[in-house]
Amino acid sequence: MGYPESYELVFQAREVAGDAVVVHRTERAGPGGCPVYEDDTGIVRAEISEHGDVRMLASGGHQAHSSVVTARARG
């Protein structure tokens, strides 16, 4: 199974509507061996499995990621 070119990541916060960001597949693989996706700024990075499991990756120091992130394949 191939990996989608892009995903929409939805960050959930308690009792607040989720924020979303579009990420695109890169040539890199994450610690789990799955593709790394990032947004256009390179700040938001995530390893996403073929099952849609998301592992957020730090792109700089002192980042604190939301504990609940959902990935939706695009196109």
Image (tube, rainbow, N blue to C red):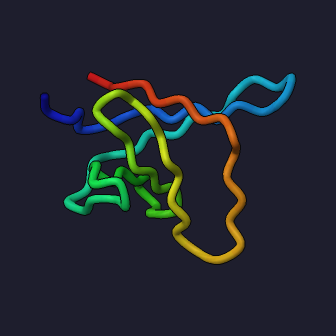
The residue positioned farthest toward the left in the image shown: 1
Q: Position of residue 72 (x, y in %)?
A: 42, 25
What residue do we see at 66% from left, 35% from top? 68
Q: From the viewer's perspective, is 3 left or right of 47?
A: left
Q: Position of residue 56 (x, y in %)?
A: 53, 52
Q: Quadrant of the C terminus?
A: top left
What residue do we see at 36% from left, 50% from top? 37
The residue positioned farthest toward the right in the image shown: 15
Front residue of this view, candidates 31 and 58: 31
Q: Position of residue 50 (x, y in %)?
A: 28, 32
Q: From the viewer's perspective, is 66 left or right of 31?
A: right
Q: Quadrant of the N terminus?
A: top left
The residue positioned farthest toward the bottom in the image shown: 61
Q: Position of residue 6 (x, y in %)?
A: 31, 37
> Residue 12 occupies which quadrant of the picture?
top right
What residue do we see at 68% from left, 65% from top? 63
| Residue 44 versus residue 70 in the image, above or below | below
| Residue 1 versus residue 55 in the image, above or below | above
What residue do we see at 49% from left, 48% from top? 55
